[in-house]
Image (tube, grey):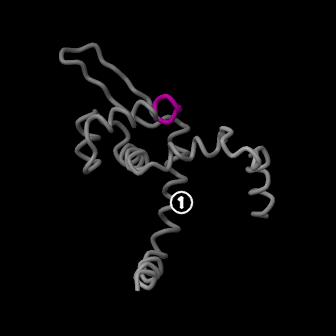
Amino acid sequence: MNDKKVKRILEDLDVENPGEVCPIKDVLAEVLDKWTMMIILVLGKHKVLRFADVKRSVVGISPKMLTKSLRTLERDGHVNRKVYPEVPIRVEYSLTEQGEVFLKKLVDLAAWIKPHVPTIVKSREQFIK
């Protein structure tokens, strides 16, 4: 079953011309970025957040990187950005329906990772030796 899925996903990939744009590779590069994943998880937990609240929740991200990541997520249809005409301007971020599906996949991935962490850590330690 997985072989068929992999074949179907990769059938348009031109292995003779790896420089060709692969939509799957392009999208994966964006969505598997560490900041993107953390932003999706934070918005999934809190539902609606202002910029400063997202920044506080995503430890270590710079304002510039947060702005870039939120714009990319908005561009790709994962995040809604709502601007309120107030002084100062209030901007809130939330997940779209597509973002909610993305969140579910991240949670599924995290659920797979969690029980495997001890094995992964052990493998890493043995690899270093």
As drawn, 114 above or below 5: below
Q: Nearer the viewer, residue 42 or 11?
A: 11
Task: Write the start and end of the magenta stretch as one range.
Answer: 73-78
Instruction: Judge whether residue 109 is colored magenta.
Output: no
Q: How many marks?
A: 1
* Left or right relative to 114: residue 18: right
Tag 1's secondary structure? helix
As drawn, 104 above or below 94: below
The location of residue 65, given as percent across then percent down, is 32, 38
Judge the density around disc 1: few (<14), some (14-19), many (≥20) Cα neighbours within 10 Å.
Answer: few
Residue extending furthest toward the left: 87
Quarter in which the N terminus is drawn = bottom right
Displayed quadrant of residue 49: top left
The location of residue 50, given as percent across then percent down, is 28, 33
- Residue at 25% from the left image edge and 51% from the top image edge: 59
- Residue at 29% from the left image edge and 40% from the top image edge: 54
The location of residue 47, given as percent across then percent down, is 38, 40
Q: Nearer the viewer, residue 21 or 28?
A: 21
The location of residue 126, given as percent across then percent down, is 44, 85
According to the picture, the residue beneath numbered tag 1 turns out to be: 108
* Left or right relative to 2: residue 128: left
Quarter in which the C terminus is drawn = bottom left
- Residue at 76% from the left image edge and 45% from the top image edge: 14
Disc 1 residue type (three-letter): Asp
Displayed quadrant of residue 85: top left
- Residue at 73% from the left image edge and 44% from the top image edge: 17
As drawn, 47 above or below 3: above
Q: Nearer the viewer, residue 91 or 21?
A: 21
